Image (spheres, grey):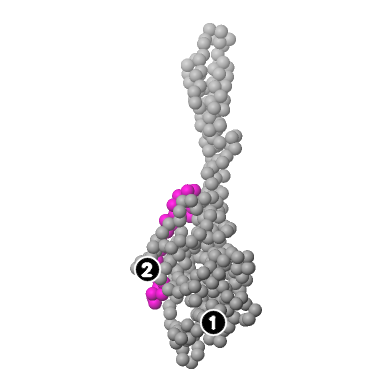
């Protein structure tokens, strides 16, 4: 009698363990699979996006009074390799327009001077805003009075042997928990020491304007962090940008159209019948039924009348 009761309890316990294990196995892949898909889609928009399309997009943003977003898009276009002089002039012009509108005179002056270096005869058409034309005229006069820095005596841009600036940085992780602080660090290879500041741009999700903050930068290395408030599901996007003394971008790791990505998975949200905890009391009830059935099935009718069986089920 006792041996049969022990055997029945053992079989029932193994059945409960199997139910719980299968339930957990079904829950885990559903969560981890989603996280993997988000992480693998990292990298943002295709880097093949051409400069001309970025300029057109930035122009639309400027017309919609989204000045900061326009600057971010133009900055990405400016550091893209292979741009033509005419495209760079258009980028600098739109940057100047945005900076003038935002009352950032130093940056606007740097953008205007960059145009004059490429095309000394450049002038804004009379159809442009008098505010912009006046600023460009004043900027050009100051540039000429200073001896046209950046232009050779022959009238063309100063031949430069500047080596390219590169930013060495990798995301700290493929994914992070919601509400955690993301610490970033990296270095800049800047042979001519042109970089004066390193900026971080970040946002939650894949749409909207990037927030901006200045990173600590010294001896060719930078570091900083993305605040926990911005680390929310489903993902975090960011990029790092180096600027020169004029406030213009000279290198970037990612950009507004092709940012770096870190997955931020949501916490598990299973239905009541999918959660492993639901099956614990159900499994216990099944166990009790199996035990009783096994015991009564092995007992004779006489034993059933004379024996008392107590089963205590606790969670």
In which quarter of the view is residue 270 placed? top right
Mark 1 secondary-structure assignment: helix
Image location of residue 168, percent across then percent down: 43, 66
Magenta extent: 172-195
Give how far across and how far down residue 129 sits, in percent.
Answer: 61, 75
Q: As rendered, which of 152 and 31 lies closer to the eye?
A: 152
Spot occupied by residue 175 in the image (x, y as percentages of width and height)? 49, 52
Along the horizontal axis of the image, is 186 left or right of 103?
left
Front-lying residue, 312 or 275: 275
Q: CA distance from mark 1 to mark 2?
A: 37 Å
Outermost residue to the right: 127
Q: Position of residue 198 (x, y in %)?
A: 43, 66
Quadrant of residue 84 within the rendered picture: bottom right
- Can the viewer see residue 101 in this picture? yes
Which residue is drawn at the image coordinates 58% and 58% (left, top)? 207
- Above or below, 171 relative to 149: above
Q: Is residue 128 magenta?
A: no
Of residue 191 and residue 308, the one placed in the foreground of this image is 191
Residue underneath mark 1: 137
Q: Earlier in the sequence, mark 1 or mark 2?
A: 1
Checking the image for residue 220, the label placed there is 2
């Amino acid at each position: 009698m006792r041996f049969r009761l022990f055997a029945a309890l053992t079989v029932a316990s193994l059945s409960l363990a199997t139910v719980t294990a299968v339930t957990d196995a079904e829950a885990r892949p559903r969560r981890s699979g989603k996280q993997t898909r988000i992480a693998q889609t990292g990298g943002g928009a295709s880097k093949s996006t051409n400069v001309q399309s970025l300029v057109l997009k930035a122009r639309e943003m400027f017309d919609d009074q989204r000045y900061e977003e326009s600057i971010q898009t133009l900055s990405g276009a400016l550091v893209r390799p292979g741009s033509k002089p005419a495209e760079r002039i258009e980028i600098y012009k739109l940057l100047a327009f945005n900076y003038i509108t935002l009352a950032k005179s130093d940056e606007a002056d740097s953008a205007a001077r960059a145009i004059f270096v490429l095309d000394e005869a450049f002038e804004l058409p009379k159809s442009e805003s008098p505010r912009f034309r006046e600023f460009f005229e004043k900027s050009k006069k100051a540039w000429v009075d200073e001896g046209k820095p950046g232009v050779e005596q022959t009238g063309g841009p100063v031949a430069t042997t500047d080596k390219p600036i590169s930013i060495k940085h990798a995301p700290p992780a493929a994914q992070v928990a919601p509400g955690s602080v993301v610490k970033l660090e990296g270095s800049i290879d800047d042979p001519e020491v042109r970089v004066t500041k390193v900026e971080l741009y970040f946002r939650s999700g894949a749409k909207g304007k990037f927030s901006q903050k200045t990173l600590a930068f010294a001896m060719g290395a930078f570091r900083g962090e993305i605040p926990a408030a911005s680390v929310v599901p489903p993902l975090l996007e960011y990029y790092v940008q180096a600027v020169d003394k004029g406030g213009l971008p000279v290198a970037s790791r990612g950009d507004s159209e092709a940012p770096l990505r870190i997955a931020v998975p949501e916490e598990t949200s299973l239905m009541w019948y999918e959660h492993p905890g639901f099956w614990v009391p159900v499994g216990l009830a099944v166990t009790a039924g199996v035990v009783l059935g096994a015991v009564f099935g092995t007992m004779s009718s006489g034993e059933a009348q004379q024996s008392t069986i107590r089963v205590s089920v606790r969670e």
